[in-house]
Amino acid sequence: MAVILGLITAVCFGAGDFFGGLSAKKTSVIYVVGFSHVVGLVGALIAAPLLADAFTWRDFGIGAVSGALGAVGVLLLYRGLARGPMAVVAPLTAIMSATVPAIWGVVGGDSLSAVAWIGVIAALIAIGMASIPNELSGTPVTAAVIVESLLAGVGFGSMFILLDITTDATAPWPIVGARTLTTAVLMTVIFTVRRAGLPTVRPAFGLILMAGLFDTGSNILFLFAANVGDLSVVAVLSSMYPASTVVLARFWLNERMSRLQLGGLVMALVAVALIASG
């Protein structure tokens, strides 16, 4: 069940990232994340009373902190998806979001098998291959895009770790905590510092709605997957989301990849599979 939930989580993560990145091409990334989190908060508030067996302020608070880290990751990711080729940004972020929980497990006493270590090496090679500029896309791969993609992955990986330490019975209340904090902060910034309103996001409203639903849905699915399986396995399976992002980019935007980048993506997915199987 954990494997199935992890893979479904990956599909939803990838779809959310695609629609979020597409939205960021039409309006400011902070508006995209802010209003998509409003959508996510509404959805999580509806789901929590129906799915949770208990509520604790501890898990609500942990969820809030994880939400802050995840929001940083989303801001950096959507910015990267809007500025650089999606087929490069998504895999780089995925590698880091899978690696951080794996390192956490090793430091905490978990031991990686030889197969898993091969996966880690393959992941590092994949990062280099996917980072080579792609002349076919017409969009340059800058150092800033690479760094922001990796930092986004660190944010997601840290979020995964925090969500994993919450109590099984409270799911998905930690996601409500996450969305409550991020929505409050982002809406405050948007309406006070930026002094923006709904007309600002109207051109991308449909895309933002889709991003919010898929993003929050993927977080809820991840929480349940982590509750029934090992964090290291669920995290790397969830990190296979670039596949759906790239497929959507290919058919929606007709975004092309070089052979080297395609090889990097394939190796990234193989690396995720090796880490998971190990």
Image (cartoon, rainbow, N blue to C red):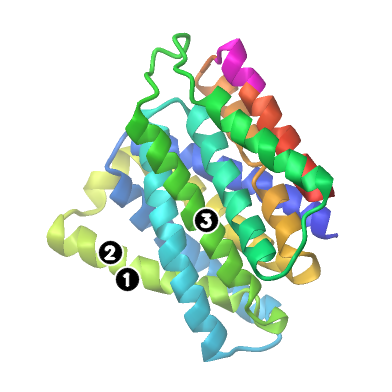
Residue 185 in the image, given as x and y percentages of width and height: 29, 68
Q: Which residue shows up at 82% across the image and 51% down it?
A: 113
> Between marks 3 and 2, how big is the CA–CA gap?
21 Å
Q: Secondary structure at mark 1?
A: helix
Residue ID for mark 1 = 184
Q: Nearer the viewer, mark 3 or mark 2?
A: 3
Amino acid type, label 1: Ala
- Relative to 145, residue 264 above or below: above
Magenta stretch: includes residue 77: no
Kindly check if marks 1 and 2 are in contact, taking CB atoms under 8 A apart as contact.
Answer: yes
Going from N to C along the chain, the mark reached first, 1 or 3, is 3
Residue 106 sits in which quadrant? Answer: bottom right
The 10 Å Cα crowd at callout 3, few under 14, some 14 to 19, many 20 or more, is many
Q: Which residue shows up at 54% across the image and 14% down it?
A: 256
Dominant SS type (magenta)? helix
- Relative to 265, residue 258 above or below: above
Horizontal side, residue 224 vs residue 146: left or right: right
- In the drawing, what numbered circle is on residue 156? 3
Kindly check if marks 1 and 3 are in contact, taking CB atoms under 8 A apart as contact.
Answer: no
Residue 234 in view (yes/no): yes
Residue 7 in the image, given as x and y percentages of width and height: 75, 48
- Relative to 117, residue 228 above or below: below
Q: Which residues are magenta?
A: 257-263
Residue ID for mark 2 = 187
Amino acid type, label 3: Phe
Q: Secondary structure at mark 2?
A: helix
